[in-house]
Amino acid sequence: MKASEKAYATIRAMILSGELASGEQLSEEALAERCGVSRTPVRDALRRLEAELLVHRNESQRSFVADWSLDDVRDAFELRAMIEGYAARRAAERMDKATLERLRACNSAIYRAIRPGKTDVSAFLQYNREFHEIVLAAADSQRLSAVLGGLIEQPVVWRTAQHYGREAFHRSHSEHEDLLAAFARGDGPWAESIMAGHIRRAFHAYADAHRGLAAIDRGAA
C-alpha cells in the first residue's frame, strides 16, 4: 500500500470510529508518527478527507475533524434521499442477477449482525455501507458516484448508531428487502421511492439517537 493510501485509510478510520473527535485539531506531525509515514502523505490524505467533508481547514490553514451539526446532517440526508433515490432507479433498470445476489448476500450479513441478543453495530455499519455502494455502482454513473461519495458515510452517524434502538436496525434491513424486491422486478420508480423513504427514515432514527446522545453529554458535563 502506498504511503498516501495508508495515511488516508488510517486517519479516516480514526475519524469514523470517534478516536479523533469532532472539532479536534489535527497535527500532521502526530498523524505521521501514528501512520508510520512522512508528513507529505499525511498532508495529501488530509486534503482528500477535506474533499469528503470529514476534515475542515480554517483560515489559518489548520486542519480539524469536521464538526457536523444536526442541520448539517439533515442537509446531507436530504441530498442523499434525492440523489440516492435516483441512483436506485438507475440501478433497478440496469440490475443483473450477479449484482442482485451480491445485494442479497450483503443484506443477509446485515441480518446476522443484528440478530437478537448479539447486535454487532460495526458489522451492521460495514455491510450497510457495502449495500449502498453496490447500488451506487450498479447505477453506472461516475457523476453520481462523485456526488454521493462524501455523503454515504459521516462520522457522526457512526458514533450515534451505537445508540440506535433495535427497531431502527431491523427497519433498515426490512427496507433493504423491499429494495431487493424492486430491483428483482427492474422497477425503477418503485426502487427510487423506497430508497428515498429509506434515507429519510434513517435521518429521523439518527436525529432521535443524536438528541438522546446530546442529553447524555450535557448530563455528564
Image (cartoon, rainbow, N blue to C red):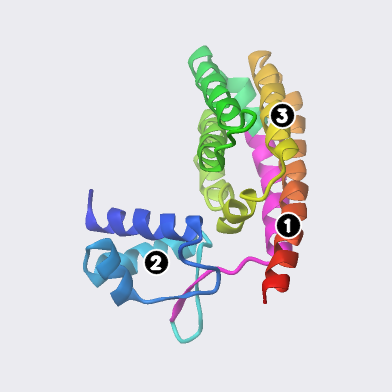
Question: Height in image: 118 above or below 183?
Answer: below
Element on which disc 3 rests: helix
Q: Earlier in the sequence, mark 3 or mark 1?
A: 1
Residue beneath the point at 66% across and 16% down:
186
**What's under tag 2, amino acid-wise?**
Leu
Residue ID for mark 1:
74
Residue ID for mark 2:
46
Which image quarter: residue 165? top right
Q: Earlier in the sequence, mark 2 or mark 1?
A: 2
Q: Residues within 10 Å of mark 1 (few under 14, many from 20)?
A: some
Element on which disc 1 rests: helix
Q: Residues within 10 Å of mark 3 (few under 14, many from 20)?
A: some
Bounds of the magenta span? 62-87
Distance from the alpha carbon under mark 2 to that under mark 1: 24 Å
Q: Position of residue 181 (x, y in %)?
A: 69, 17
Residue most extreme to the front: 117
Residue ID for mark 3:
175
Which image quarter: residue 144? top right
Q: Earlier in the sequence, mark 3 or mark 2?
A: 2
**What's under tag 3, amino acid-wise?**
Glu
Is 73 magenta? The answer is yes
**Viewed as shown, does residue 147 lie left or right of 2?**
right
